[in-house]
Amino acid sequence: MLIKSLLAPLRWLARLLLALIILFEEWGWVPLQRAMAWLGRLPLLRQLEAGIRRLPPYAALALLLAPTLLLLPVKLLALWLIAQGRALLGLAVILVAKLLGTAVLARLFMLSQPALMRLPWFARLYARWTVWKQGLLAWVRGSALWRQARTLRRLLQRRWRRMFSQQA
């Protein structure tokens, strides 16, 4: 009982951190995927995407690992820059790598999801992940802090619109 009460704040903190990471991914996933879809209209990329859609399930799964593996040297470069005293440049490299990696991963997942869902274990894990993620996001969205932030955002949006409608 004592251990459980001591671990409760840590569980809450871990849940909050995971929720923030997921919210960041959710916030960026759709717009970045749209941007990559726009790029996918280019003839060469259109052919590449068609090939990705035809991949068998395990090849599609291997392809999803590619962005992580390809970005590892970039992240190591960023850490090296930070160690050399160029912290802002290193941080910028990490942020750009995260943004591009998320964009590519979002597009690859969208293209390969039908193939991946043919793997029973993947479909099962994905369903569990989706339920867990929705529950975590509901917990965040139900919090007082989230509701206050949404109220503040709406207020700022109204003021922004009024400010620009008066200038027009």
Image (tube, rainbow, N blue to C red):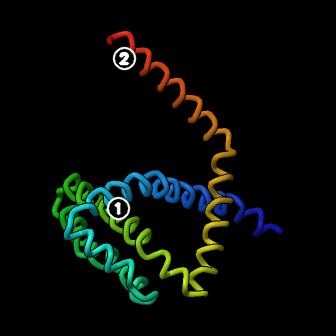
Q: Position of residue 25 (x, y in %)?
A: 46, 58
Name above or below for residue 5 compared with residue 51.
Answer: above
Name above or below for residue 154 compared with residue 13.
Answer: above
In primary-sequence order, the first of circles 2 and 1 is: 1
Q: Residue at x 38, y 85 (%)?
A: 55
Q: Amino acid at mark 1?
A: Ala
Quarter containing the N terminus: bottom right
* Nearer-the-camera pick, 47 or 160: 47
Q: Amino acid at mark 2?
A: Phe
Residue 96 quadrant? bottom left
* Nearer-the-camera pick, 120 or 73: 120
Q: At numbered mark 2, what does the secondary structure look like: helix, strand or loop? A: helix
Q: Position of residue 166 (x, y in %)?
A: 38, 10
Say which residue label 2 marks. Answer: 164
The numbered mark at residue 165 is: none
Q: Classify mark 1: residues with Cα within 10 Å, few (<14), some (14-19) or many (20+).
A: many
Q: At numbered mark 1, what does the secondary structure look like: helix, strand or loop? A: helix
How many discs appear?
Answer: 2
Of all residues, the one furthest to the top in this rendering is 166
Q: Are marks 2 and 1 in contact (CB under 8 Å)?
A: no
How far is mark 2 from mark 1, CA to CA?
32 Å
Say which residue label 1 marks. Answer: 103
Residue 92 quadrant? bottom left
In the rendered structure, the answer to whether residue 97 lies left or right of residue 163 reads left
Q: Residue at x 60, y 87 (%)?
A: 120
* Nearer-the-camera pick, 132 or 94: 132
